[in-house]
């Protein structure tokens, strides 16, 4: 059973006690802390009341520690060192880190940024690991459940989520991806020719129309979606060997078309929308984590160094 109520103990008194016990002199302890001698004397009187012990006892040579003070001095030093460690800003050394970074997002979107991040990790943080988790319908819920540290997405939460933070990594226009042998390959697209073609759609959920369906509806047109995919990885195969058109963010379309008999066409002016923006999201619980801050800094720098988009 404790003899004192620590809930009523002022932690500042422990700092004063530490100095009193180390100096063994009221005036010197006060001077070292920039306090007046009366203020330190009042603090000593309160400490004596708290500990029910004189703590400093007068001798012919000045003051000495009481038996109780000698007993608590090493423990007090340890407690204050622990408190200092508790409140000081954590030091992050990427080369010594052994943490795991968990990220979710669509496969091809992630390949725009994360291979470069992995390259940096292998050089600057060789003990750090990267885990890519399959994206669910709602990656923001995965952040909220602490299943991942980051989500890369071109979407925004359906409702305002005050616990989420984000940075924009990139923005780009949507373009039309088609086979190099497509009947529309050598002509400028019009809203009518675009709508009349067969289309493919990448949809995470596999449900509902794409945003382009709403754009077409706004100008009195409608398209036929003949293929719905849940991933970007097979878009090139379907697009190269069929007459399907895919409407995709430009940097993704360029990545898909690389080395394939595919080409990119700008959308008709009447169908062009504000650029697609890619965000990197994280939860407030990790906002001040120095490891996560390091990852964010790397990704921002990676995005800054991406080659400029080809004007179409």
Image: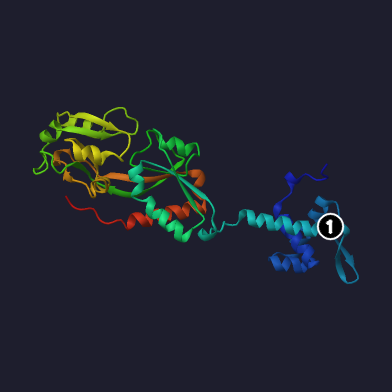
At horizontal 21% and vertical 41% (from top left) the residue drawn is 273
Q: Nearer the viewer, residue 49 or 189?
A: 189
Against 145, residue 280 (above or below) is below
Q: Position of residue 227 (x, y in %)?
A: 24, 31
Residue that appears at 36% across and 46% down: 110
The coloring applied to the image is: rainbow
| Residue with the most extreme left position | 187
Find disc 1 in the rendering and name its residue.
71
Counting the numbered discs, the total is 1
Q: Residue at x 21, y 47 (%)?
A: 260
Residue 73 placement, left or right of 305: right
Query: Quadrant of the rendered structure where residue 278 is?
Result: top left
Secondary structure at numbered mark 1: helix
Figure quadrant of residue 66: bottom right
Q: Within 10 angstroms of label 1, few (less than 14), some, or many (20 or more) residues?
A: few
Whether residue 50 is visible here, answered yes or no, is yes
Res. 38 visible in picture:
no
Q: Is residue 33 above or below residue 183?
A: below
- Quadrant for the N terminus, please: top right
Residue sitting at x 34%, y 54%: 303
Examine the image and state in which quarter residue 238 appears.
top left
Image location (x, y in percent) of residue 86: 63, 53
Q: Position of residue 120 (x, y in %)?
A: 42, 58
Q: Is residue 40 above or below residue 253?
A: below
Residue 173 shown left or right of residue 37 in the figure: left
Q: Residue furthest right?
A: 60
Image position, residue 13 (x, y; %): 73, 55
- Above or below: residue 131 compared with residue 66: above
């Amino acid at each position: 059973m404790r003899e004192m109520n620590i809930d009523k103990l002022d932690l500042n008194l422990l700092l004063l006690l530490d100095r009193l016990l180390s100096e063994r002199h009221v005036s010197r302890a006060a001077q070292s802390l920039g306090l007046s001698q009366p203020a330190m004397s009042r603090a000593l009187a309160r400490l004596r009341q708290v500990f029910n012990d004189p703590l400093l006892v007068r001798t012919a040579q000045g003051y000495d520690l009481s038996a109780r003070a000698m007993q608590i001095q090493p423990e007090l030093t340890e407690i204050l060192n622990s408190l200092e460690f508790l409140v000081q800003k954590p030091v992050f050394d990427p080369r010594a880190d052994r943490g795991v970074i968990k990220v979710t997002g669509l496969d091809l979107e992630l390949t725009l940024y994360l291979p470069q991040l992995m390259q940096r990790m292998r050089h600057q943080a060789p003990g750090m690991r990267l885990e890519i988790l399959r994206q669910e319908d709602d990656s923001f819920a995965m952040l909220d459940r602490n299943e991942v540290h980051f989500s890369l997405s071109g979407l925004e939460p359906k409702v305002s989520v005050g616990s989420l933070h984000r940075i924009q990594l990139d923005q780009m226009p949507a373009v039309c991806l088609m086979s190099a042998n497509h009947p529309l390959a050598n002509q400028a697209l019009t809203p009518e020719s675009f709508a009349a073609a067969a289309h493919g759609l990448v949809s995470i959920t596999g449900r509902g129309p794409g945003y382009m369906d709403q754009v077409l509806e706004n100008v009195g047109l409608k398209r036929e979606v003949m293929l719905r995919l849940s991933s970007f990885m097979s878009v090139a195969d379907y697009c190269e060997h069929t007459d399907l058109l895919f409407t995709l963010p430009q940097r993704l379309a360029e990545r898909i078309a690389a080395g394939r008999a595919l080409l990119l066409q700008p959308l008709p002016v009447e169908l062009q929308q504000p650029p697609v923006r890619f965000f990197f999201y994280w939860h407030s619980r990790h906002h001040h984590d120095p490891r996560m801050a390091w990852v964010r800094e790397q990704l921002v720098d990676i995005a800054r160094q991406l080659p400029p988009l080809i004007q179409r």
